[in-house]
């Protein structure tokens, strides 16, 4: 039986998949595990009554397991691993936090109005640490095969590449060759192609935060 999955719809087009990286992480996990699911696209600015009824906090993503709606991508991915152990996406514990600060460093730099506030340097230093890790352990975070940590990082790196390119004409330094290779590998996976938001919706999703 297909799992019921509610994720963010695109800004300005409620019938198209939206730009939430946490929603995409869940969809990537479902795709990699070949679990069938039924998608509900939620217009965040106009949430349907049924959705608020089952999920009063109104957050996405949420997935229905055994009749109960569960929020939080960390929790959802954990349950999926437990219920559908094959193929295993378990990340070795020593690698589980690799790249975990990249997203927030990216957000700080994206919103920054002052080029000397250190946010760009902080992001580059997080990406450099990831590059060093991939150089030693790659091509994925835990070696030859994709694991949960990669599926968490992939949407965040996609948002980073798209929005920093658009709003700041910024790209990941060429010197970080392992990061470039890693993003290429992730973005070309079939699961990623199938679950990514179109670039214009990623830009539309971030525009209000950038211009705030």
Image (cartoon, rainbow, N blue to C red):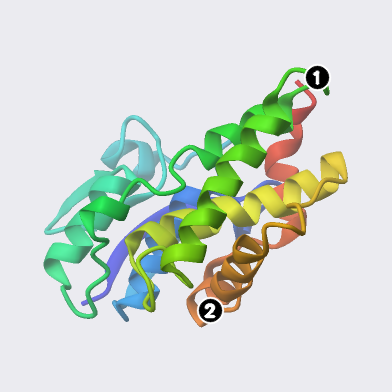
Instruction: Specify whether residue 41 is in view.
Output: no
Q: Nearer the viewer, mark 2 or mark 1?
A: 1
Q: Could you say where residue 212 lies in the image, as x and y percent from the top left?
A: 75, 20
Mark identifier at residue 128:
none
**Residue 125 position (above or below residue 139):** above
Which image quarter holds the N terminus? bottom left
Q: Is residue 148 toward the left or the right of residue 208 in the image?
A: left
Local secondary structure at mark 1 = loop
In space, the residues marked 2 and 1 are separated at their CA atoms by 37 Å
The image shows residue 83 at horizontal and vertical percentages of: 13, 67
Crowd band around label 1 with a 10 angstrom C-alpha radius: few (<14), some (14–19), many (20+): few
10 left or right, relative to 58: right
Identify the residue shown where x is 57% and y is 75%: 185
x and y, in percent, of residue 25 in the image: 43, 58
Q: Which mark is residue 116?
A: 1
Q: What residue is drawn where x is 69% and y is 32%?
A: 121
* Residue topped by disc 2: 189
Given residues 128 and 156, the one toward you in this image is 128
């Amino acid at each position: 039986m297909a799992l019921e999955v509610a994720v963010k719809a695109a800004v300005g087009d409620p019938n198209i998949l939206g730009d939430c990286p946490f929603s995409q992480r869940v969809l990537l996990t479902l795709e990699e595990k070949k679990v069938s699911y039924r998608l509900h696209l939620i217009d965040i600015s106009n949430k349907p009554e049924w959705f608020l009824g089952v999920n009063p906090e109104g957050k996405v993503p949420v997935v229905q397991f055994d009749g109960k709606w569960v929020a939080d991508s960390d929790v959802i991915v954990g349950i999926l691993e437990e219920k559908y152990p094959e193929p295993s996406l378990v990340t070795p514990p020593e690698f589980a936090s690799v790249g975990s600060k990249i997203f927030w460093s990216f957000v700080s730099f994206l919103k920054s109005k002052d080029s000397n506030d250190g946010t760009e340097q902080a992001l580059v230093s997080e990406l450099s640490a990831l590059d060093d890790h991939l150089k030693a352990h790659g091509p994925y975070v835990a070696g030859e095969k994709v694991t949960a940590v990669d599926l968490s990082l992939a949407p965040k790196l996609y948002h980073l590449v798209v929005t920093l390119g658009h709003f700041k004409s910024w790209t990941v330094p060429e010197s970080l060759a392992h990061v470039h290779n890693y993003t290429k590998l992730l973005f070309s996976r079939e699961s990623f192609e199938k679950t990514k938001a179109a670039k214009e919706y990623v830009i539309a999703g971030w525009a209000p935060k950038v211009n705030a």
